[in-house]
Image (spheres, rainbow, N blue to C red):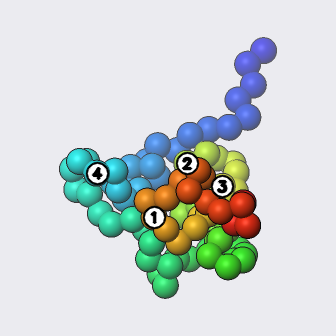
Amino acid sequence: MSVNLLDFNISVGRKKPRTIPGMPNQSTCPFCDVQNLTGILATEGNIILLKNKYNVMVPSDQLVLIETDQCESDIPDYTPEHM
């Protein structure tokens, strides 16, 4: 018996902005433009939880966690207090 619990809507994924350096039609990082973010569920300092604008998994409610306002940083760069 085959059960499919999750479907991928790739047509939604095609609408996502391209933000990886070197990709054609590159746009700026959408997460850096905090003033224009939509679907914000919670904030704590510079950490933001929001609904994913491009839900590719159906049915689901995908969320995005913006961990910091430093676009080029990563977990090793975070202070212990931030973690």
Residue annotated with mark 3: 62
- For residue 31, say whether it is visible: no
Give amino acid for label 4: Pro
Give amino acid for label 1: Cys
Mark 3 or 1: in front is: 1
The secondary structure type at the circle numbered 2 is loop
Marked residue nearer the N-terminal end (3 or 4): 4
Give amino acid for label 3: Gln
Q: Are marks 4 and 2 in contact (CB under 8 Å)?
A: no
Figure quadrant of residue 78: bottom right
**Marking on residue 71:** 1
Q: Are marks 3 and 2 in contact (CB under 8 Å)?
A: yes
**Marking on residue 21:** 4
Q: Position of residue 10 (x, y in %)?
A: 46, 43
> Whole-Å distance between the Cαs marked 3 and 4?
25 Å
In the figure, is residue 43 to the left or right of 66? Answer: right
- Residue drawn at x 45%, y 64% is 71
Marked residue nearer the N-terminal end (1 or 2): 2
Classify 10 Å Cα crowding around label 1: few (below 14), some (14-19), many (20 and above): few
The quarter in which the C terminus is drawn is: bottom right
